[in-house]
Image (cartoon, rainbow, N blue to C red):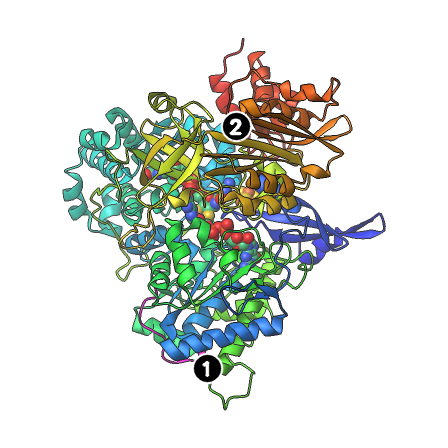
Amino acid sequence: MSEDAAAMKADHQGGFAKTVTRSTCCYCGVGCGVLIESQDGRITGIEGDPEHPANFGRLCTKGRSLPLTAASETGRALRPELRLTREARREPTDWSLALDHVAARFADVIERDGPDAVAFYISGQLLTEDYYVFNKLAKGLIRTNNIDTNSRLCMSSAVTAYKKALGADGPPTCYEDLELARTVLFAGSNMPYAHPVLFRRLEEAKANDASIKWIVVDPRRTDVAALADLHLAITPGTDVALFNGMLHHMIWEGLVERDFVAAHTAGFDELKALVRGYTPNMAAQICGVAETDLLRAAEWFAASPAALSLYCMGLNQSSRGTDKNLALINLHLATGQIGKPGAGPFSLTGQPNAMGGREVGGMATMLAAHRDIGNAEHRAQVEALWGVSGLSARPGLPAVDMFDALAEGKIKAVWIACTNPVHSMPDIERVRKALRKAEFVVVQESFLQTDTVPYADVLLPASSWGEKAGTVTNSERRISRVRAAVEPPGDARPDWWIANEIARRLEARLAGPQAHDCTSKLFGFASPKDVFDEHRTLTIGRDLDIEGLSYDRLETDGPQQWPFPADAASGAARRYTDGVFATEDGRARFHTTAYQGVAEPADARYPFRLLTGRLRDQWHGMSRTARASASFNHAPEAALSMRPEDAVRRGFKDGDLVTVTSRRGKLVLPVETTDDLPSGTVFAAMHWSGQFLASGGINEATIGAVDPDSKQPELKHAAVRVEAAKLPWRLVAAKRGDVLALREAVQPLLAARRYASIRVEADDLVVVSAADVEADAQWTERLHDALGLARGDELLEYRDARRGRAQRVAWNGELVDGFLLTGDTSPAAALIEQIRTAAPWQGPRHAIVLLGGDTPVRSLAPRVRVLCNCKQVTQPQIEQAIATGAGLDELKATLGCGTVCGSCVPEIKRLLNTTAPA
Ligand SMILES: Nc1nc2c(c(=O)[nH]1)N[C@H]1C(S)=C(S)[C@@H](COP(=O)(O)OP(=O)(O)OC[C@H]3O[C@@H](n4cnc5c(=O)[nH]c(N)nc54)[C@H](O)[C@@H]3O)O[C@H]1N2
Ligand SMILES: Nc1nc2c(c(=O)[nH]1)N[C@H]1C(S)=C(S)[C@@H](COP(=O)(O)OP(=O)(O)OC[C@H]3O[C@@H](n4cnc5c(=O)[nH]c(N)nc54)[C@H](O)[C@@H]3O)O[C@H]1N2
Ligand code: SF4
Ligand SMILES: [Mo]
């Protein structure tokens, strides 16, 4: 269906035209097509696009919640804001002043300290067109390569390994391989959470063919691990040893595809010599798995008619991320599991446009269209195409080094766009120091509630999903259009426009005082289409040639895969099908990958291995997902997961507060026990930040050690100590209301307590828990005001000085509207339940604080997990039905769970496997 046809679906309801706009989901790299429904300038609904080849109409919980997150202007960046000194508050200003100011400050620094004194830190969530303009601004105009992106934290190990092994970046595979694979190896990938719609495709394939084998390599028993035929719960960081051991067995058993190796690869003998030392027995010991499991994995992979590996951050985010990728690619090359349907090493991209960023060369070590900065011929090509001279040959600084250079005063000015480094970088105190030290910080953001915004000297309000247009490339190299359904709120503007406007001003300033002409040759872009057309020209003759792919073509033919040269009728589903790789001699390269371990192994002082990762319904720093209360149903607050035996050994119970300390920083979290972790390992979700916690989240503790080739930091592994937090003073408060407004009011108070956490529950209930060494009456009053407890119908206060209790309950007629408990917080759970159920209170009001009074003191109220967001079905409901003998189909039929987006199905299947019918 063309854009026009989609718009024609528009109908009339209630007097206002309802419009349907075809676009792409702004979250993960699956790149689902969406149909955005809007009415009267507001986004009112969303459906999966049945014609998009990534999702065929499906969406996951995150995609489905997009309209909710776009519903309100509260917390949106609406005006440019500016402060002239660090001490001042930022004041709203107009675009013209803001653009001039940024151009002037950048020009000053460049003229005084040279081009490498400025830096850009951008994002795989920018559209290709945004990315392109930023890259041209830094590399073509300023002539610095100090432009890096959050893809450094995400995909750079995959990029380096693809280039080293196959000669070019980008996966050789496509989504159809998900259905065609007979053995699927998930390595460091939790697809049910991170790539749900692709996981739906895998589930369906396996349901249709029980002979399909799933192997999962993950230290944690994730949902996919629990459903797999084989789960290798390796010791974190030991993947290279595992893959080397598997290859050893393949060689020994004659499972290597000799003809393929001889005809299409180089370097096998050196690798063979290396893996001789990795006997399966020795490898299994390093990895802490059974040798028989390792052997079985090797056999299932090598002997399969089609083996597909799906890998993500468990491999990339490592100080040996490149080696982890290479060791896995070695297995594909040795067994010829590449370049044919259903087979190949498939790096799943995280962000919606991680691929597009790579295509325009949006990192410190790349140039446009997969060219290299270090390559003189490549630089000359780009100079000719851009009509500039003197591109810098000095590689720019990758993310971690970039922030260090800011802290050391080598870089003076930084422009951050579409990423939130004060939350997502490892060792965030280092980032905060860098931004405090910087002379000038620009933050280009759509939402105000992030941990980076307070550091902005200039805040540039960006339009966001649903309001901007361009293209993105998903994990299978497919380019899709992103279209605007509504106007941006306030003065927000598209990212490409902001970069283009400042570039034009900077160009004029750098040209000197005599140059009054502001018309730019370099930055004459009038629309995203103009930008795309220029990008397209730069790809001609490159591996990602898209000369044949214009905006018009994307309009008529829909999303397309690259390469798509001028004479092509369609894009290429798979690469290297002829066995010719993108290296000079056409041969893929084996690499000798010796196992090296993690940067910071656990030791006597820091005995726990800390793992980090994702939750099902939240996106990164939650600036968008947290705008929909439903996103919290599955996991309402921050916690540290730990194995029950490990907790018992240290005397921790569920809900106890613990201090997690690494060599870099610490934070306080409640313990949550789980059998899904190996002993000695703890896990924290990456999402929680200073918007929800007294600390900045788990990256207070992570380590900035990077991979020597890819410079990707080891966000997945650090050594930590976990001790009881001795914080006897406790507070729990809750209020039902506008969650965004309540969060905005409470957030500034969080950092003042040793522990503080905002939890959000369904039906717009905000719960604040806090703990500290002693009471702070003033803080309690400020919290009381922030929650607006006094605004209820009536506030009743009960004090018991002897027992150090203060209890306030806000009433709204017979309903409890909110409360605040200090000292003894034991009635909290019952009071929350009272608010949650909105049941009128029958007895005398004072009796309500006796509710639950004899339950033990806890820092947290127990929570009811909502597994199915679409139909609001809780875990106890599902467990009860299973206990009476219900199977999956019956659960779907009676409770409705799992019938809409399917995100909860893997967990329901797990419950079916573990909950015995009564
Ligand atoms: N819901 C949701 N989905 C997302 C995102 C989100 O924020 N929320 N973000 C998107 C982005 S940008 C990305 S990059 C992807 C990430 O997608 P994934 O990489 O699939 O997700 P993670 O949870 O970060 O990590 C995956 C797994 O790696 C495991 N792991 C840790 N250490 C090791 C190790 O040494 N070896 C192995 N083999 N495994 C290890 C962890 O236990 C974890 O289960 O998700 C994308 N999709
Ligand atoms: N410990 C730990 N840390 C991690 C990870 C981990 O697994 N563990 N994963 C890492 C990975 S893989 C990634 S990708 C990073 C992600 O880390 P970040 O890039 O920091 O993640 P986001 O919160 O998505 O940041 C995007 C920001 O852009 C804003 N935004 C949204 N739309 C727009 C827009 O259209 N224009 C502009 N200008 N801004 C917009 C959002 O409000 C948000 O603040 O985190 C990394 N950090
Ligand atoms: S799987 Fe979910 S988050 Fe990813 S693109 Fe599709 S709907 Fe969006
Ligand atoms: Mo990512």
Q: Residue at x 62, y 26 (%)?
A: 799
In the rendered structure, the answer to whether residue 405 lies left or right of residue 458 reads left
* Quadrant where ligand 3 appears: top right
Q: Amino acid at mark 1?
A: Leu
In the rendered structure, the answer to whether residue 369 lies left or right of residue 514 reads left
Q: Which mark is residue 860?
A: 2
Q: Quadrant of residue 816?
A: top right
In the rendered structure, the answer to whether residue 269 lies left or right of residue 737 reads left
Depth check, front residue: 20 or 407? 407
Q: Amino acid at mark 2?
A: Leu
Q: Which residues are magenta?
A: 386-397
In the rendered structure, the answer to whether residue 517 lies left or right of residue 848 reads left
Task: Indicate whether residue 893 is drawn in magenta.
Answer: no
Predominant secondary structure, magenta span: loop
SS class, disc 2: loop
Residue 526 appears in the picture as rendered: no
* 101 versus 886 height, above or below: below
Residue 698 appears in the picture as rendered: yes
Q: Decide if ligand 2 comes within 8 Å of the CB at mark 2.
A: no
Depth check, front residue: 120 or 456? 456
Alpha-carbon neighbours of circle 2 within 10 Å: few (<14), some, or many (≥20)? Answer: many
* 172 versus 756 height, above or below: below
- Residue at the spot of label 1: 510
Q: Quadrant of residue 819?
A: top right
Task: Tell me the mark number nearer the camera, choosing from 1 and 2.
Answer: 2
Q: Residue at x 55, y 75 (%)?
A: 100
Looking at the picture, how far across and down is residue 189, in whole percent? 41, 39
Q: Sequence order check: which comes first, mark 1 or mark 2?
A: 1
